Image: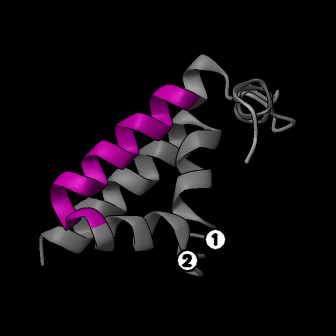
Amino acid sequence: MASPRECAELSFRKSVAPRLSPAEARRQGQITHLAFLLLGREPAMAFLNDDNARLGGRPLDLAMASEEGCADIEAELGRLTCR
């Protein structure tokens, strides 16, 4: 069994993944919240994370990349839920 010190070292490793900018983080939270409200948890996760040929990429990546991308994903969510 690992000592408490070993556990602490394992759980606090510095991430090598790049950090999101404040704008990217805001758009990620905004689009995720909207998708969860409109679609429900599981369908929202599938929609946001699966590649979408119609949109030209993964909706979550597109929304985080720019304000225009976020607006495009918001519009697509509107189309999906207003049928």
**In the picture, residue 66 is in which quadrant?**
top right
Residue pointed to by mark 2: 52
How would you rate the neighbour count of disc 2 (Cα within 10 Å): few for under 14, some for 14-19, many for 20 or more? few
Chief secondary structure of the magenta span?
helix
Residue 23: percent from the left, percent from the top? 56, 22
Query: What residue would you read off at disc 1?
Result: 56
Name which residue type carries label 1. Gly
Task: Say what amino acid the circle numbered 2 marks.
Answer: Asn
Q: Residue at the location (47% across, 44% down)?
A: 70
Disc number placed over residue 47 in the picture, else none? none
Residue in the foreground of this view, choosing between 83 and 12: 12
Q: Residue at x 25, y 55 (%)?
A: 36
Range of the magenta residues?
A: 25-41
Residue 78, image quadrant: bottom left
Closer to viewer: mark 1 or mark 2:
2
Q: Is residue 55 above or below residue 63?
A: below
Q: Quadrant of the C terminus?
A: bottom left
